[in-house]
Each structure stands twice: as structure tokens, then as C-alpha cells.
Image: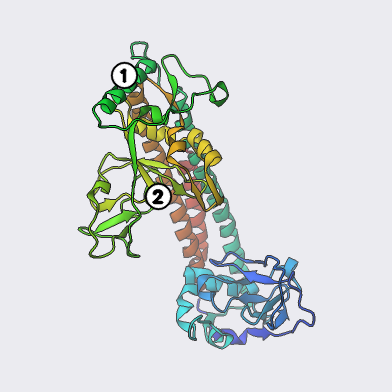
Amino acid sequence: MTWQKIKIRKILTESKVPSDSPDPDKRITVKLNVKGVEKRPFENGIEGGTKYYIRRAGQFIYGKQNLFKGAFGIIPSELDGFESSSDIPTFDIHEDCLSEWIFYFLKQGDFYKSLEGLAKGTGSKRIHPEQFFDIDIPFPSREEQQEIIKKIKSFETKYDTLQSELKLQSELLTQLRQAILREAVQGKLVPQDPADEPASELLKRIRAEKEQLIREGKLKKEKPLPPITPEEIPFELPQGWVWCRLGDVTLKSESGKSFTCEKYPAEYPEWGVIKVSAISWDAFNEKENKALLRNTQPTLAYQIHEGDYLISRANTEDLVGKSVVVGKVSLNVLLSDKSIRFLFSSKVDKHYINLLNNSSIAREYYKEVATGTSDSMKNISREQMYSLLIPLPPFAEQNRIVEKVESLMTLCTQLEAQITTSQQQAEQLMQTVLRDAFTNPDIMEEAELLGEEKATLFETEQLRLF
């Protein structure tokens, strides 16, 4: 089966009904990435000389500057009578063409992205109706359009259901990760061993170690930490554990330096300065850096090495105070002034401190003490880091906890990979169905059956994660 192709101008007519009394609270905007048409948030300000036009439900609409970024759609009934400027034109559709036919044509295979070359102008480029009208579109009968769109929507419903389920599984996986950390730091993840040296004795030996280093001039005496009050203690500890503060197990800490950097990341053997994003996502990412300004000598004291424990002192509300234990380092990277390096006593496992610091206990603490007027940039002081409450287990149990957590997190990562693969496969299948609808209609039925088969496969084999 083949269809004739026509110019879009034959089925679209630009609508230019001016608004006699423009209303700032009745404005339309078109979201990017084919996310639909919606009411623009009300802006209470002085209206300029922009002319607005009345738009009607069922009209096709697009943004001149962002059509190739997915800014197009069909005006829904609840926005009937709303307005937009000529920068967001609308079009009446010929009675022989369904509005969804144009919508899905632009969406299939991300066809809209190929339209970037049509944009004209200097500065902000735009795709004007005259350029848009010259696009060729397959044009079957209205009855054929209805039949194909019905099949597309049927598959789209299954696709949306599948993606919703995958999103839920992803959210549950995030909760599972936090539950693992919570159980770990409450002593519920591995059994206690009465033969382990109690953490209270461990603390005594750490204090003695620090005092000896101070006497030898290798450490500076620090200000005493505040005593732990009963009101601070969030839960009861198992036998052999003890409450302390991060400063109790810290030998020393140091912040980085504010270096002048280039805008691009460093490549070996260049030197780079890490961004906070290098330590924001549970694993050290050395590629998140900015190259040191050319002809600037690096301060080697700030070089980051494998095994370093780093905390961000400045970040968003959700990420400030996040930490990592640095893995293998292949680039020359330096500590920034927004990150702190901690050196702990060898009598504590820094990997245990790291999982505690990234658990909900620490996250809630940092949110409470962080300063800054904007959620996008909060700060915590070194003193606040030192005051973080630590449920400290015996050293041998710390090791067992870390081993168990790493094992469970590996499983979570595998489950996460399954979810990602399922999401990608579902998206690819959706695009295949759309593409075939416009290029190979004879196999639409086959694609729909394949979609049902794939959806069933995902549901039975990949979604039962918990």
C-alpha cells in the first residue's frame, strides 16, 4: 500500500484572529520534547506592544523557535479561547485530515528534530509557517487515518502503562538503596559478634592515637566537640556499638583551593580541578572537572589520590554533604575549595563512614544545618561536618557491614540496568510503531502484535524486581 504525499500547506491554514482585549492570565505555551500544550504561568507586569491572537481547541500549534525541539501539539478543550503571539502560531486543519495525523507524523522517528535546518534568521532562529508548509506528509484517506491512529493509541496506552511501571520500579529501587543504608547503620543488616572489641574501646584507642600525634606535633589540638545529648539520639544501638561524632574518629581534614580554571574539562596529562558533581552521585567521577588555567602550576598538596574520602561543603539542598571514597584515578585532578578531604584513624573503616554519611540520617542532618537562601546552593561548615552523629560499631563489624552493603548495592545496580534496558527497548518499540505507521502501513498489525509480546515479556520477566 502506498499513499500520495502532499505539502502540509494543503491541510493547514494559519489562524490569525486578533484578541481585542488580551488577557495575561489566558496565555498558551508549548512544552519542549513533545510534552504538550499548557497554560502559561500568570505574569503580573506591564504589557508591551506584542499582538495576541485567539486560539481554538483542536488547532495545531507550534513554537517557531523550538519546533525542532518538540514544541508542538494540539490545543486541548480546556485552553479554548486562550491566546498566543505570532511566535506561537496556530492552524486550522482541513476536514479530511485528523489533527492526530499531523501530530504523530512529526513525532515519528523524532522527525521534528530533522527540521532544525529550516530555521532562519540571525540570533534566535525561527521556523516560519512558509518553511513549515513546504514539508511533505503522507496523506491517506480519513478512514485510514482513523484506523492507524486507533492502533497507535492502543499501543501508546500499553507503552505508557509499561513506562509508569518502570518508573515505579525505579523509585522503589531508590527506596531500597536507602533502606539498605538505614538497616546497615542501625545494626540490623549483619549479626553482632560478642567476640568483637566494643566500639567504646575502639574510641579510647582513637583518642589515645590523636593525643600522641598532637604531642608529636603532627596534629593540631582542635576545639572540643559538643557532648551528645539524649534528645539527639534517634534510635537505640546494638550491644557493642557507641554514639560519637565524626570529629571523634577524624585525625585531620583539609579543604581545597579556589583555582582559576578553563571552561573545558582536563585530559591527561593536563591538570583539572574537580566540580562538586564529581562527588555528588555515590561514586567519584574524575571527568567532572575544569582544566587548570594554562601555564598555572598545580599545588600538589591538593592532588586527589585513590582512597581519599571527600565531602562536598557546597551543593544543592539534596546533595550538600554528599561524600565518596575515591576509586582508581587516571587523571591529574585537584581538590576544589568546595570540597573537604578527611583523614580518619586506621581504626575505623572509611567505607563505613561513607555509607553512613550518605544515609538518610546524615542527609536529614545536613538539610537541617545547611545555610544559604537558595535551594540550588547550600553550604555546610567543617564544624557542622565534625558534629555529625555517628552510630559506631566494632571495627570488625564495620568491615562486615561494608561487605554486605557492597554486595546488595551490586544487586541494586543490576536491577537498575534491567530497568534502563526495558525503558530503552520500550521507547525503541514505540518509535518503530510510529515509523511503520507512516512508512510501512502494511506491517502495522505485525508491529502491534510485537508490541503486545514485548510488553508481556517486560511484565513477566523484568518488572518483578522485589
Q: Residue at position x 29%, y 32% from top? A: 219
**Number of marks in the image?**
2
Identify the residue at horizontal 49%, vertical 24% (top origin). Answer: 227
Judged left or right of residue 445, residue 393 is left
Colour mode? rainbow
Which residue is at a point 48% across and 58% down the rendered structure image? 427
Give coordinates of residue 47: x percent, y percent. 71, 77
Q: Position of residue 96 (x, y in %)?
A: 66, 80
Reading the image, the residue beneath label 1 is 205
Is there any visible trace of residue 408 in the rendered image? no
| Residue at the disc numbered 2 | 338
Which residue is farthest left? 269
Give left or right: position of 142 versus 179: right
Which residue sits furthest right? Answer: 21
Mark 1 residue crowding within 10 angstroms, few (<14) / some (14–19) / many (20+): some
Classify 274 as above or below 99: above
| Residue 138 pos. (x, y %) | 53, 79
Callout 1 secondary element: helix
The secondary structure type at the circle numbered 2 is: loop
The kind of residue on which mark 1 rests is Arg
